């Protein structure tokens, strides 16, 4: 089964990327894998504190994921999976793509900020020609209705 990989973070554009991935998966018989990455700078403390912070970060991610997963199950009939990785964002995305051969498309949300589409889109689009899968970049300001129409 082909899976759509989508990155879960705290950005506003993440919502449209998740919606798009779920709608495309529902209409194409695919699945959704949600990837959340804990950056290493969150753990530059004492070992005991770092372990506690890591556990809290994973709990926040799981709660955030469950909100989206419930919507995907209820509205799209998709049961997404969650993968949590630790490290630098772009290398971890590439590692996940490499580790899971069922991933067929990377779905990213583009920021509407005048500074550009966001760091993940910017970094990955520079190397898009050498990636093993296509990237779909979803504009962050598309309405739900427009997303439904194009998926």
Image: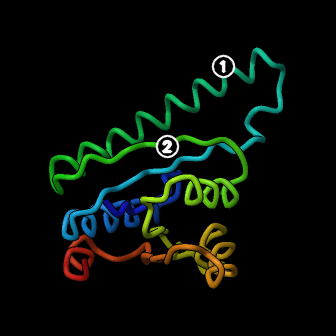
Residue 44 percent across, percent down from the top left: 83, 32
Q: Is residue 36 above or below residue 113?
A: above
Proximity of marks 1 and 2: CB atoms separated by less than 8 Å: no
Quadrant for the C terminus in the image: bottom left
Circle number at residue 52: 1
Quadrant for the N terminus in the image: bottom left
Query: In the rendered view, does 135 fall on the left or right side of 94?
Result: left
Which residue carries the number 2 mark? 83
**For the residues marked 1 and 2, what is the alpha-carbon distance in whole angstroms?**
19 Å
Residue 60 percent across, percent down from the top left: 50, 33
- Secondary structure of residue under mark 2: strand
| Residue shown at the point (19%, 81%) measured from the top left | 149
Q: Nearer the viewer, mark 1 or mark 2?
A: 2
The residue lying toward the viewer, choosing from 104 and 148, is: 104
Q: Of the residues under marks 1 and 2, which one precedes in the sequence? A: 1
Query: In the rendered view, does 106 fall on the left or right side of 122?
Result: left
| Residue shown at the point (55%, 60%) measured from the top left | 97
**Colouring rule applied to residues:** rainbow
Q: Is residue 71 above or below residue 147?
A: above
| Residue shown at the point (19%, 69%) measured from the top left | 27
């Amino acid at each position: 089964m082909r899976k759509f990989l989508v990155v879960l973070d705290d950005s506003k554009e993440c919502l449209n990327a998740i919606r798009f991935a779920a709608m495309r998966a529902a209409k194409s018989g695919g699945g959704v894998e949600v990837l959340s990455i804990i950056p290493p700078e969150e753990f530059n403390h004492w070992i005991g504190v770092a372990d506690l912070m890591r556990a809290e970060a994973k709990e926040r991610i799981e709660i955030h994921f469950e909100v989206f997963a419930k919507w995907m199950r209820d509205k799209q009939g998709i049961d997404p999976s969650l993968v949590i990785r630790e490290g630098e964002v772009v290398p971890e995305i590439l590692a996940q793509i490499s580790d899971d051969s069922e991933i067929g498309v990377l779905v990213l949300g583009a920021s509407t900020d005048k500074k550009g589409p966001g760091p993940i889109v910017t970094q990955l689009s520079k190397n898009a020609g050498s990636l093993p899968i296509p990237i779909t970049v979803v504009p962050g300001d598309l309405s739900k209705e427009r997303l439904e129409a194009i998926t």
